[in-house]
Amino acid sequence: MRRTIAASPERADPDRQTETLRTEFPFELPRGYVDESGTVHRDGVMRLATARDELVPLRDDRVRENSAYLSVVLISRVITRLGSIEDIHPGVVEDLFASDLAFLQDFYRRINAEGHTRAAVTCPSCQESFAVDLSGGGRLGES
C-alpha cells in the first residue's frame, strides 16, 4: 500500500511542485533473514504505520498472552518486502536474529515518530559531528 498526499489543485501554487509524503523507507538488516533454503535476505522496505497497524495486534491472542510479542506482530504488518520475500508474517519476524529485530524496532520508531532515518553521530577519532542515514545505503565501516 503506497499512500501519498498532495496539495489540492485549486489551492496549489502553480509555480511550486506537488508535495508528497514519503510513506516507504528502504533498509538493510545488519545480519539478514535466512530462509528455509539458506538464502540471506538483507534489504527490505518498511512503510509508515497506521493507527490500525498499532491497534489490531492488541486483539491478537499471542500479544495478550505475552506483551513482548507486540513488536513481532507490529513489525510484520509494516514490512512490505524483505529481500525477495513479499509475504511478511510474524513467523518471518520470529526467525530474525535478535540484532536485526532490534534494528527494525529502532527503524520503526525513527520513521514513525521522527519522520526520517537519519541519526546524529560523532566520529570517535576527530570528534566531528555528522548525520548518517540508517536506511542501509552501505555496510558499516565501508565508505
Image (tube, helix red, strand yellow):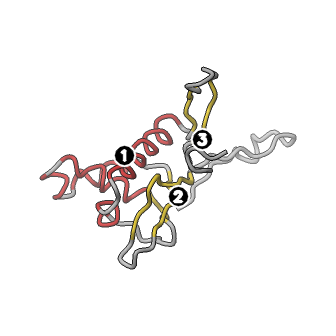
**Residue that appears at 61% across and 50% down:** 138
SS for callout 2: strand
Q: Nearer the viewer, residue 84 or 21?
A: 84
Three-letter residue code for mark 2: Val
**Residue 9 location (% of width, % of height):** 75, 48
Q: Residue furthest right?
A: 15
Task: Pick whichever of labels 3 and 2 is earlier in the sequence.
Answer: 2
CA distance for labels 3 and 2: 14 Å
Q: Residue furthest front?
A: 125
Residue 45 is tagged as: 2
- Residue 87 is left or right of residue 95, and the answer is right
CA distance for labels 3 and 1: 17 Å
Q: Which residue is mark 3?
A: 133
Residue 102 is tagged as: 1
SS for callout 3: strand
Q: Residues within 10 Å of mark 2 (few under 14, many from 20)?
A: some
Q: Image height check: is 115 above or below 43?
A: above
